[in-house]
Image (cartoon, coloured by chain):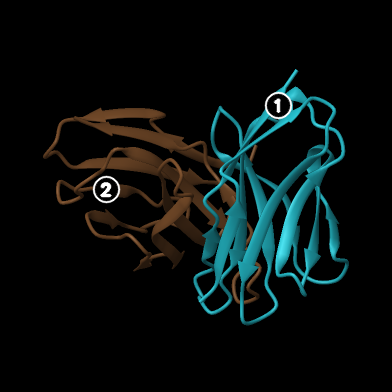
Amino acid sequence: DGGITQSPKYLFRKEGQNVTLSCEQNLNHDAMYWYRQDPGQGLRLIYYSQIVNDFQKGDIAEGYSVSREKKESFPLTVTSAQKNPTAFYLCASSISRGTGLYEQYFGPGTRLTVT
Amino acid sequence: AQSVTQLGSHVSVSEGALVLLRCNYSSSVPPYLFWYVQYPNPGLQLLLKYTTGATLVKGINGFEAEFKKSETSFHLTKPSAHMSDAAEYFCAVSDLSFEGGKLIFGQGTELSVKP
């Protein structure tokens, strides 16, 4: 079955540690995205990538980093510079470029807790 | 800049009653509009989308939404609520000025269904 997988579902880290969240898709989508979800704030875009080896900052990129070495994979690293990293992180992908119809498909998410 | 406003962070209805979740957007160009649902086992699922053509859009699980350009609205409705509809709902607009396919999400509306 095609889809987006995120692992792990729950992640716990100590403050000051970097942590990497995995996102893999087998939908053959060009574009991939990372969002952060906090209660009452909807989804906010962290980073996005339209093609391999290229990515751009979203609205809240500070304290985060990404890579896109393969079409299928778009890992997100939450660095120790992120001041409030505890949140629910959602990865998404989309098929259509250039038309504006960027219907996005989402993974199940990773809940990160930093103490 | 485009934006989305969902009126009411919490909506409660009785089982069998009409569901109405409100969404207003601002856009300088004809928008592409989406409704997503997030169940307690998370990850967002696309309910329906408006691109062009018919302004009344039907989605999954009996939901529909009507695009009203004059009111800049895209409200989500369902004639008869079911207990399984309890979830958080997000309205989103595609930012057509953003080549990366950015979706701008509203803050979300949590729907509760009372027996």
Residue at 57 percent of width and 62 percent of height: B4
Task: Residue A19: tell me if it is visible.
Answer: yes
Looking at the rendering, which quadrant does residue A58 occupy?
Answer: bottom left
Q: Is residue A111 left or right of residue B18?
A: left
Give x and y (percent) for residue B17: 83, 32
Query: In the rendering, which numbered label is found on residue A77?
Result: 2
Q: Secondary structure at mark 1?
A: strand
Residue A96 visible (yes or no): no
Q: Which residue is mark 1?
A: B113
> Above or below — where is B68 with respect to B107?
below
> Which is more foreground, mark 1 or mark 2?
1
- How dense is the environment of label 2, judged by Cα within 10 Å: few (below 14), some, or many (20 and up)? some
CA separation in Å, label 1 and label 2: 38 Å
Measured from the top left, where is residue A105 in percent x and y? Answer: 59, 50
Dot 1 and dot 2 within a common chain: no
Q: Colour of chain B?
A: cyan
Left or right placement of residue B71 versus residue B106 in this view: right
Quarter of the image containing the C terminus of chain B? top right
Quarter of image, res B23 = bottom right
Q: Position of residue A36 (x, y in %)?
A: 40, 48
Q: Residue at x 60, y 58 (%)?
A: B92
Q: Nearer the viewer, residue A25 or B2?
A: B2
Chain letter of the residue beneath label 2 in the structure image: A
* Local crowd size for mark 1, using a 10 Å CA cut-off: few (<14), some (14–19), many (≥20): some
Q: Quadrant of residue A60?
A: bottom left
**Which color was chain A given?**
brown
Kind of residue at badge 1: Val
Q: Callout 1: residue from which chain?
A: B
Q: Is residue B73 above or below residue A85?
A: below
Closer to us: A34 or B22: B22
Q: Report how many numbered discs are placed on residues in the image.
A: 2
Amino acid type of the residue tagged 2 in the rendering: Thr
